[in-house]
Every structure is written in structure tokens, then in C-alpha cells.
Amino acid sequence: MTRGRSKNNVPKGNGLRANLPSKICPVCHRPFEWRKAWRNCWDDVVYCSERCRRRKNKSNP
């Protein structure tokens, strides 16, 4: 794989990622974008990662 290219050999920055929906994680307050693995349950996704899901009830320093 060549540096600067995605898995499907399309150069990065082709504008396709700009059209993906995003959400803000309520734990870390960072934006995260739609992933193919979430295509069937995007409306149910709340946390950006498993780590944030586990930390949802703990106080955030």
C-alpha cells in the first residue's frame, strides 16, 4: 500500500469523507464520523469508542 492512499487505492482528500455524517461523543466531547460497521445502527450509536462507552458513568476529569 502506498503512503497517502486509502485501502481501496483512492487518494486521500478526494472529498468522499466530507459527506459522512458525524456526532459528538458525550464522554470525550470529540466529533466522530460514520463508519461502515455502523451502517445498520447509526441512529443507536452514542459513543465514539468502547473506552468512552465504559467510562460513561465515571466522572470526566
Image: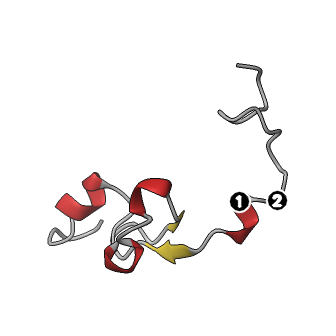
**15, above or below 40, in the image:** above
Locate residue 28, reporting x and y percent.
39, 66
Q: Nearer the viewer, residue 58 or 13?
A: 13
Locate residue 13, reporting x and y percent.
83, 50
Residue 44 picture quarter: bottom left
Instruction: Identify the colour scheme used.
Output: secondary structure
Which kind of residue does numbered mark 2 sit on? Gly
Residue 17 bears which disc, if any? 1
- Between the residue at mark 1 and the residue at mark 2, the CA separation in whole angstroms equals 6 Å
Q: Which residue is mark 2?
A: 15
Q: Nearer the viewer, residue 30 or 39?
A: 39
**38, above or below 44, in the image:** above
Indicate the quadrant containing the C terminus: top left, top right, bottom left or bottom right: bottom left
Which kind of residue does numbered mark 1 sit on? Arg
Residue 20 picture quarter: bottom right
Mark 1 packing: few (<14 Cα in 10 Å), some, or many (20+)? few
Residue name at image x 82 percent, y 59 percent: 15
Locate residue 41, reporting x and y percent.
35, 71
Element under disc 1: helix
**5, above or below 17, in the image:** above
Locate residue 50, reporting x and y percent.
27, 54
Residue name at image x 70 percent, y 36 percent: 6
Residue name at image x 77 percent, y 20 percent: 2
Q: Nearer the viewer, residue 57 or 61?
A: 57
Residue name at image x 27 percent, y 53 percent: 51
Whether label 1 touches label 2, CB < 8 Å: yes
Element under disc 2: loop
Mark 2 packing: few (<14 Cα in 10 Å), some, or many (20+)? few
Indicate the quadrant containing the N terminus: top left, top right, bottom left or bottom right: top right
Q: Identify the residue at the far left of this view.
A: 57
